[in-house]
Amino acid sequence: MQVKKTTLAEAASLVSDGDVVALQNMATQAAPMAMVRELIRQQRRELGLVCLVGGIALDWLAAAGCMNRFTGNAVSMEQFGLAQHYRHAVEDGRICMEELSETALLARLGAGARNLPFLPTRGMIGTDLIDINENLTMLEDPFGGPPVVACRALVPDVALIHCHRADRHGNVQYEPTALWPDVGIMPKAARRVIVTTEQIVDSDVLRANPDRTVLPGFMVDAVVEVPWGAHPTSFNPLYGYDAALHLAWVAAAGSDNDVAAFLESYVYGPDDHEAYLAAVGGAERMAALARWEAG
Amino acid sequence: MQVKKTTLAEAASLVSDGDVVALQNMATQAAPMAMVRELIRQQRRELGLVCLVGGIALDWLAAAGCMNRFTGNAVSMEQFGLAQHYRHAVEDGRICMEELSETALLARLGAGARNLPFLPTRGMIGTDLIDINENLTMLEDPFGGPPVVACRALVPDVALIHCHRADRHGNVQYEPTALWPDVGIMPKAARRVIVTTEQIVDSDVLRANPDRTVLPGFMVDAVVEVPWGAHPTSFNPLYGYDAALHLAWVAAAGSDNDVAAFLESYVYGPDDHEAYLAAVGGAERMAALARWEAG
Amino acid sequence: MGTPAYLDSPPAGDWTVDELMIAVLASCFSDGDQACNGMASFLPVAAFQLAKLTHAPDLVWLAGAVGLEPRPGPIPASTLEAPLWRDALMYVEQYGDFWTLALNGRWLQKFCVGAAQLDRFGNANNSVIGGDFHAPKVRLPGTAGLADMGSLDKRLYYWNPNHNPRSLVAKVDFVSCAGYLGGGDERERLGLSGGPELVVTNLCVLDFEPDSKHMRLRSVHPDVTLEQVLEATGFEPVLPPGDVPTTPEPTAEQVRLIREVIDPHGMRHREFRRR
Amino acid sequence: MGTPAYLDSPPAGDWTVDELMIAVLASCFSDGDQACNGMASFLPVAAFQLAKLTHAPDLVWLAGAVGLEPRPGPIPASTLEAPLWRDALMYVEQYGDFWTLALNGRWLQKFCVGAAQLDRFGNANNSVIGGDFHAPKVRLPGTAGLADMGSLDKRLYYWNPNHNPRSLVAKVDFVSCAGYLGGGDERERLGLSGGPELVVTNLCVLDFEPDSKHMRLRSVHPDVTLEQVLEATGFEPVLPPGDVPTTPEPTAEQVRLIREVIDPHGMRHREFRRR
């Protein structure tokens, strides 16, 4: 099998300016944050992001000027409130949002993964979301039943996911399981797939539980070992979200200087992932998050 | 939670003459054979069966005169050859077969499960399967892409599945995982679900591995404990198929008397599942199948 | 076994409005229902647990739309993260499982909706306020599952802990969740069944007039006046004939369960803005 | 490390036709391809393993369309049951995973097809022979995945261990797997790319004339005559200019691997009817 193991910097080179980037993320959960920071450091521009529910990752990308469009269900850091930089960028017209219901986003990605021109849903009928979106259209049932909403196929240029373990060939496992659809469908729809993983293991470890493998290596273009790679989001069951860092970001939101200082401390400043972990509190902090104590 | 635990005889009463019955089965694998034998004993008539690949279960149901129609991908006992009774019944016009490609069957069931009037596939284009089937029709892509085949929703009256363990509330687990789509989609599409299980366990056993639960109890109408309930088909990883019993059935196929004798010995004759297991070789035979030695 | 405590428990006396709202929401869910919750949904989560501990032990709860029937601990700071759904009977994968269930009309027939704006016909808005969709005055978080649930024949139960003329409006700026649309039979004409059933706020309970589908005052909470409700509402709700009923107080047992068992850390208070 | 044995291995000398067919099929699969197999597919399974053991170690095999890269033991009596795919890296669930992969044109681009009838334009039939579809003379097992694979832009490789005028026919009784349909550009006009590439039988190897898409003789196996091939074929295949080439014999190393490592129990012989 081919070897896909590489570094964050190399993997990020698979993402070009202007790309549509599908990002694993569910509010405060499971975002491939180390890869997001690398994209910010490498100053990617005009990215289109695709998430179910974007959280702090999206707010950082918006604050750093990396993105100009978003397709997804919502943007929220749940208990930490709205993503203010993302929000203001939409209000200013710097980011264009394609807002979809959950079934519509899954239909768009599902069609992309299956090389179907569209998939239907019955969600959204009667809302204002359909008419303003050229990727959605009402469609009569050819068998005479009720109409559906056809959702046009979406094929992201690249998908970024974070997993519990992988081998160097890019075979990907989640433990206990892949809960969110961004794992179930986004990487299958995307042209390229970049995986960060808590741990790179020997293939024999995967063979012990083949039912936990969710992506075959041949669909993966790069795999990078990044322990705590989802921090400051949570990564069930290994660690909880970092409430303190979320709150620090929210506190910085009101001032350009504070935002710049925050990004310098935690994104641009640290030389590598190890330096980042030291900056956010090091081993002691991580141990607390592993006990889900810091949320 | 409600208690769904019951007996084979009671569970079978959820299946009425004329019902469309979705049956877990993949050639020589994983069919809920104990429930199939109970339906034959109770002399259900005019059933419509739905399988991916029907095997000996379908041939018994055909030989016993229980079914008059079939929707599925294929009927084959793989190394044991064609299901001759099923085949002759189709040739004689006693059973009507709706033949679908795999993606089309999954689309029909997927639409049924999701209350969508249809789902599309790109399979079958150019074949003779579309024009002869009123449940399939070509459909233009409303976004101007290539046409698709719309597959009309299929909602079976009842689904029969066999699983590794369940609790008395009908929460269903497979171990290591549910491999075939008849588990993934058939029970979700059907109006009623009957589960046979190798073992009924306390709910706490399920809580230890919630990722292995594939059906929530509220979707299940009846659960029956039937160890070796898939015999003579295999049930990975617990036991292999029974080659001897398959071969005995194939050998009987040529003679009405032999078929009647076979059904008497193994279907009508045994008073209960324990008596059936004794008739097919008892504990010693089961131990060999558990070592996958008898295939 | 004796009578369950919740059946003969007297009114609580020292209840607060969060507890009253939880009790009203709990009364909407029965044995045989399946309930699920999304993000930042402390009142619905408390209500499901209260229902299960009292009148509806066979209510099925899908915590965070992920964990089937978890063993409830105190409500944590997030209603979407793992601590809420640990020790579940099943992890419901979202793509293949949850939305298949939700699209199928037989399951998850009732859904609690929280949104920034709600209008007199029960349409909800969690998308944009003011301006154009692509250059709004305020960008809200986004519709997420609401745009599905509103169109999938569900019965919708709105909760609003901050009843004011900006959150209860005559017409939403943008329909991101279909209620009764323009009222009357417009929803039916689109082939949609179900629809909004109830609105529970920090001031009152409202439902919908059967023909016009206009929002209707059902009861005013104890210590709240009709005038306060009307002043806080961006439109004139239909009034019931005669005196407006008073919302029943939660019982002492309900309040005890909420405070001691379900939400001892008081996460439910996070939903209420200081006034 | 020296030259791998398969590269400088001499012709086997004592090969049999099953081994030759396996070697031809193996040559169709390369590093970077993903291969999968269905029921009763002993020759393809042996070919994938042979390719992986010789020229294509990075060929990815999805055994039984379920088990990713199992550790190959001797081929068991079934090519769909668990013994074939034990010890895999991944269990590929069929509904969400396998058919998503197969529908997406980038994966599983090549597929081996076995069918009861194959016609001069590469259309295959595994449905019915004779009579009406609903009252056929012979009911075959059914199309299963073939009707998908033929229309999903795959390159199709047919194998037929029983070359005779009933299995290689001028026109199939029923198209259950789309080949080149009526020939020429009919497939392209329906928007289908891919299509039949090669036919490997127990007598010869055939491919398809690029313009007409008519089946064309590519090589005749050693010890088989052109006349034998033409007699056994239900139509006249296009003949190559000049002498018909002879199919290369499998090498000694290929034969050793098949006999000793891949299929020591000789399951491959089950595909050949006694004549």
Image (cartoon, coloured by chain):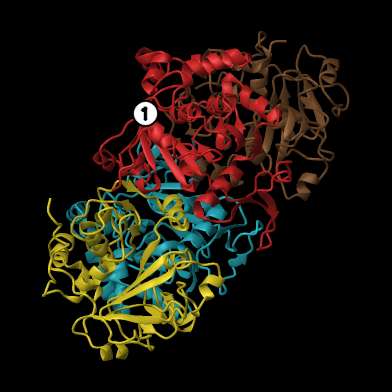
Chain colours: A red, B cyan, C brown, D yellow
C243 vs D138, left or right, is: right
Residue A198 % position (x, y): 35, 30
> What count of labels does the image hold?
1
Residue D127 % position (x, y): 43, 75
C50 vs B211, left or right, is: right
Q: Can the viewer see residue C158 in this picture?
A: no
Badge 1: how crowded within 10 Å, few (<14), some, or many (20+)? many
**SS of the residue at dot 1?**
loop
B94 vs B247, left or right, is: right
As rendered, which of C35 and D238 lies closer to the eye?
A: D238
Choose top left, top right, bottom left or bottom right for residue C197: top right
Quadrant housing the C terminus of chain D: bottom left
Q: Residue furthest right?
A: C242
Q: Residue furthest top?
A: C14
As rendered, which of D147 and B84 lies closer to the eye?
A: D147
Up the image or down, C238 lies above or below B34; here it is above
Up the image or down, B92 lies above or below A108; here it is below
The subunit letter for the residue under badge 1 reads: A
Residue identifier under label 1:
A226
Choose top left, top right, bottom left or bottom right for residue B295: bottom left
As rendered, which of B82 and D88 lies closer to the eye?
A: D88
As rendered, which of C73 and B245 lies closer to the eye?
A: C73
| Residue at the image position 63 percent from the left and 40 percent from the top | A101
D12 vs A212, left or right, is: left
Residue B208 % position (x, y): 35, 32
| Residue at the image position 61 percent from the left and 33 percent from the top | A74
Q: What amino acid is found at the position of numbered circle 1 in the picture?
A: Val
Up the image or down, D83 lies above or below A290; here it is below
Residue A120 % position (x, y): 61, 52
Q: Can the viewer see residue C197 in this picture?
A: yes
